[in-house]
Image (cartoon, rainbow, N blue to C red):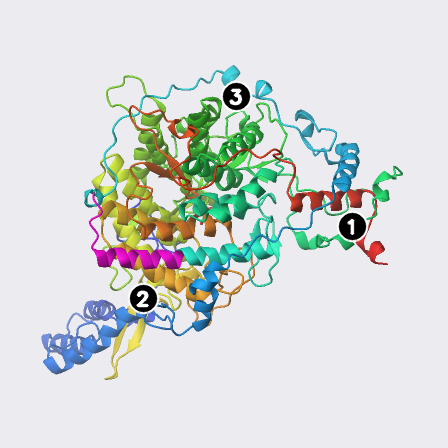
């Protein structure tokens, strides 16, 4: 079937499209259209055809009347009326750009407080006394040692109870009831099925990524001072949110900032602590890093803490069941509640946990980080022991798919684990990790091309029927990092020699990247014409390709601007430098302009999750505006102007500041810093509270509501890191030396002549030069206090203990 590009002009489809590909919709005339010049002319034409004997005079009269009536879209040229109209139209761009934020910001960074109208903000985290008062981790109640042993005995006996379907092909459970790792020797790795890994080539000298003006730090003293002040605000914002987490939710995945509660959506190992490890190092927060590593050392990967800690009593000594309960071997109760989660979200575990450990190791050379990374990767690797090598999205620790087929998988999940496994192979010298990633990328590379939009994939792939390639094509959620990892793998591998006769993995990924981005130019990237003042900007929308609607196959394009897509400015900028693709650089700038508008056009100065724009070809996009003199003009509908619909919550995502960071480092243009500062001040002002920073429900409200959802670990790992780095000296984590994962964890890139495992040396890493020696703790993986408590609650439940009974 054809893979021809979508038309870029004319009858664009839009949120009201009927789904043809490209759109063939004939829109019914709107009221405005009926009264427009064109509509009137059409009616006049029909009139003349009906009454052919109409005289020339009638025509002249009608024409004069038409000209008069059409004046709203064609203002008369008298200077007086012209200026009046200009005034009226001059309001239109302000509808688009009207920045409804509650004060004109940013104030000059030299101002002692960027939020003078909100003194409580200064009290929370700006004063040096607030910063000095480090809020120490409030460790959950430690379950006494004898309870831990008794709990192990109970859960060990009941291990079969939690042998979920398919568990039989795992290695089983140990005598404490924990699942055991699948041994590497048993692991299905595709080689028996005929797959062979490609050999990694030698790194080459890659084109420069950072702007040459950064070769020397050429910032003036004033600029340096400004950067330093802004950076310090970011650092204190991080300390504020870290302090809230440490005080209220230490050991749980996420802090609920309003209630001080906690939640465990990512295995309950503390996604926040892991995801923040490298940020702590980069910001020089050594005491906090020591606290964090103590926790990292304890985590037991074999135990998944239940996701809702409020479903059982808070850890404290008065809630301990009697120890004798565990000695009673009488009939054991079933698992009614409090059971351990059965599976992990594999991709999230790789990017949030494994990526953070490896990055922390690259920055500090802390041996604990590499040990814990290897341990975790060995747990995770069997998730890729499927027929195709694509990972099992919800993987039960200890299970072995052993060459099983998957059905539907998500592109971003199966296609973006390569950086983490490559870095692990580079650091350990064990090629097995990267081979697993290679196998999954080979599967994608050889996916049937028929009916596919060239190098692009839909968000979901059916691994059984590989030719079924309908669905959404996007750079947004569920696809995003697949494309990002192709170019970043190329860089982390150190590129490839153009003279090499066989294709090595680096050149393979560069080829896949080029093919994907070329297709995106044809299918996904389109100019935005509907927002006054945003000329030259583009969006990267979604193609719904060959989707079934009531038995009919349809395709259409959506003019969307997802916050998640906004990472693409950075990706395209990076790729343009590494692979000499000038057009991509322009697109990076034009798209980041659109992502910036998404912030600047709202009342809070923050961007919504998702925007759908009116398309240029849709006549319904117009709205009548009454002018002072009684005439009507037209403007594009929407608030902000041009927006057809939007999901207005803001969850503190990093993608736009990520792209600003890349473009700043690529161009040396300080206006990207100013934009980031504007976003940062709006973000703090709107989302801050005692616990940290909250998601908000409506970016376009004058009184947005904060909510108590858990603060995502990417706020610590990504958002605040990019804000910090954009105000840092440009050689701090230069983009020529470091590759940032999709979760913003920097890995050291391979360079010609230097071993890619160079940073595995025993000396302190670049971000731990003046810190105390980091040695291996005696015990690793014994379980965090939160995990021990949850296991005890689980065992007590098995034994029939109820907390009501205890209270009675
Ligand atoms: C992050 O967890 C990662 O960047 C992921 O790839 C998608 N986006 C979120 C943050 O928005």
Task: Mark 1 vs mark 2: give the one in front.
Answer: 1
In contact (CB < 8 Å): disc 3 and disc 1: no
Q: In this view, does 498 lie above or below 710?
A: above
Residue at mark 2 to residue at mark 3: CA–CA distance: 54 Å
Task: Mark 2 vs mark 3: give the one in front.
Answer: 2
Instruction: For residue 19, say whether it is visible.
Output: no
Residue in the image at 15% along x and 72% along y: 53
The residue that disc 2 covers is 106
Q: Could you say which is closer to the camera, residue 42 or residue 693?
A: 693
Q: Decide which of tag 3 and tag 1 comes sooner along the chain.
A: 3
Q: What element carries label 3?
A: loop
Q: In which quarter of the image is the N terminus?
A: top left
Q: Relative to 742, is 375 on the left or the right?
A: right
- SS assignment for the magenta stretch, majority: helix
Q: Could you say which is closer to the camera, residue 88 or residue 73?
A: 88
In contact (CB < 8 Å): disc 2 and disc 3: no
Residue at mark 3 to residue at mark 1: CA–CA distance: 45 Å
Q: Residue 189 carries which label?
A: 3
The residue that disc 1 covers is 320
Residue in the image at 34% along x and 37% along y: 738
Any magenta on residue 637? no
Q: Name the spot of residue 449 as percent of width and height, x first.
A: 38, 30
Q: Is mark 3 within 8 Å of ligand 1?
A: no
Q: What stretch is highlighted in magenta?
A: 216-234
Q: Name the spot of residue 432 as percent of width and height, x first.
A: 48, 22
Q: Is mark 1 on a helix, strand or loop?
A: loop
Residue at mark 1 to residue at mark 2: CA–CA distance: 53 Å
Q: Is residue 477 above or below residue 154?
A: below
- Disc tally is 3
Q: Is mark 2 on a helix, strand or loop?
A: loop
């Amino acid at each position: 079937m054809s893979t021809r590009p979508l038309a870029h002009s004319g009858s664009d489809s839009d949120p009201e499209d009927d789904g043809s590909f490209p759109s063939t919709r004939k829109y019914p005339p709107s009221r405005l259209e009926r009264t427009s010049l064109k509509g009137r002319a059409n009616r006049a034409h029909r009139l003349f055809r009906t009454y052919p004997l109409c005289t020339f005079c009638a025509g002249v009269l009608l024409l004069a009347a038409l000209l008069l009536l059409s004046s709203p879209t064609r203002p008369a040229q008298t200077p007086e009326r012209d200026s009046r109209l200009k005034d009226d139209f001059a309001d239109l761009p302000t509808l688009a750009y009207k920045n409804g934020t509650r004060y004109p910001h940013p104030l000059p960074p030299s101002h002692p407080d960027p939020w003078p109208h909100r003194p409580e903000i200064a009290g929370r985290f700006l004063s040096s006394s607030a910063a000095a008062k480090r809020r120490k981790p409030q460790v959950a109640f430690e379950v006494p040692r004898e309870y831990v042993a008794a709990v192990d005995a109970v859960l060990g006996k009941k291990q079969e109870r939690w042998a979920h379907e398919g568990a039989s092909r795992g290695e089983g459970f140990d005598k404490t009831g924990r699942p055991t790792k699948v041994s590497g020797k048993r692991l299905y790795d595709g080689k028996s099925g005929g797959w062979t890994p490609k050999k990694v080539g030698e790194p080459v000298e890659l084109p420069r990524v950072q702007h040459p003006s950064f070769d020397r730090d050429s910032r003036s003293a004033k600029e340096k001072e400004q950067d330093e002040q802004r950076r310090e605000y970011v650092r204190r914002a991080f300390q504020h949110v870290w302090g809230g987490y440490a005080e209220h939710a230490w050991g749980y995945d996420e802090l609920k900032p309003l209630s001080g509660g906690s939640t465990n959506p990512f295995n309950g190992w503390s996604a926040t602590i892991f995801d923040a490890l490298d940020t702590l190092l980069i910001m020089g927060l050594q005491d906090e890093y020591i606290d964090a590593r103590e926790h990292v050392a304890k985590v037991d990967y074999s135990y998944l803490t239940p996701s809702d800690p409020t479903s059982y009593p808070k850890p404290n000594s008065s809630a301990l069941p009697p120890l004798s309960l565990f000695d009673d071997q009488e009939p054991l109760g079933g698992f009614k509640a409090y059971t351990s989660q059965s599976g992990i979200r594999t991709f999230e575990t790789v990017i949030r946990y494994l990526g953070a450990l490896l990055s922390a190791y690259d920055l500090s050379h802390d041996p604990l980080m590499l040990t814990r990374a290897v341990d975790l990767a060995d747990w995770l690797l069997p998730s890729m022991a499927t027929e195709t090598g694509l990972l099992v999205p919800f993987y039960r620790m200890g299970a072995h798919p052993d060459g099983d087929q998957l059905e539907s998988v998500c592109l971003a999940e199966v296609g973006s684990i390569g950086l983490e496994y490559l870095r692990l192979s580079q650091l350990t010298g064990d090629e097995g990790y990267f081979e697993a990633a290679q196998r999954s990328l080979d599967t994608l590379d050889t996916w049937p091309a028929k009916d596919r939009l060239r190098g692009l994939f839909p968000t979901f792939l059916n691994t059984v029927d590989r030719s079924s390639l309908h669905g959404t094509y996007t750079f947004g959620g569920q696809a995003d990092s697949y494309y990002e990892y192709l170019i970043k793998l190329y860089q982390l591998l150190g590129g490839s020699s153009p003279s090499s006769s066989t294709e090595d993995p680096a050149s393979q990924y560069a080829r896949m990247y080029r093919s994907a981005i070329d297709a995106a130019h044809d299918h996904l990237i389109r100019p935005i014409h509907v927002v006054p003042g945003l000329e030259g900007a583009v969006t990267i929308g979604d193609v719904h390709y060959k989707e079934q609607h009531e038995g009919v196959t349809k395709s259409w394009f959506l003019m969307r601007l997802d916050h998640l897509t906004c990472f693409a400015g950075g990706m395209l900028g990076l790729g343009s430098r590494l692979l000499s693709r000038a057009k991509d650089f322009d697109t990076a700038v034009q798209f980041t302009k659109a992502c910036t508008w998404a912030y600047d056009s709202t009342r809070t100065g923050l961007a919504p999750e998702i925007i759908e724009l009116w398309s240029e070809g849709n006549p319904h996009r117009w709205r009548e505006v009454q002018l002072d003199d009684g005439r009507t003009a037209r403007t594009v509908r929407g608030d902000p102007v041009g927006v057809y619909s939007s999901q207005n919550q803001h969850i503190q995502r990093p993608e736009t500041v990520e792209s600003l960071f890349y473009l700043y480092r690529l161009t040396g243009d300080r206006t990207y810093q100013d934009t980031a500062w504007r976003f940062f001040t709006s973000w703090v002002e709107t989302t801050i509270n005692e616990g940290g920073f909250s998601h908000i429900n409506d970016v376009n409200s004058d009184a947005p509501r904060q909510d108590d959802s858990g603060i995502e670990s990417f706020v610590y790992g990504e958002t605040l890191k990019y804000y910090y780095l954009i105000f840092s000296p440009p050689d701090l984590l230069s983009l020529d030396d470091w590759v940032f994962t999709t979760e913003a964890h920097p890995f050291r890139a391979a360079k010609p002549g230097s071993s890619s495992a160079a940073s595995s040396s025993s000396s302190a890493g670049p971000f731990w030069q003046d810190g105390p020696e980091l040695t291996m703790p005696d015990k690793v993986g014994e379980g965090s206090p939160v995990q021990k408590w949850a296991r005890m609650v689980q065992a007590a439940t098995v034994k029939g203990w109820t907390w009501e009974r205890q209270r009675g």
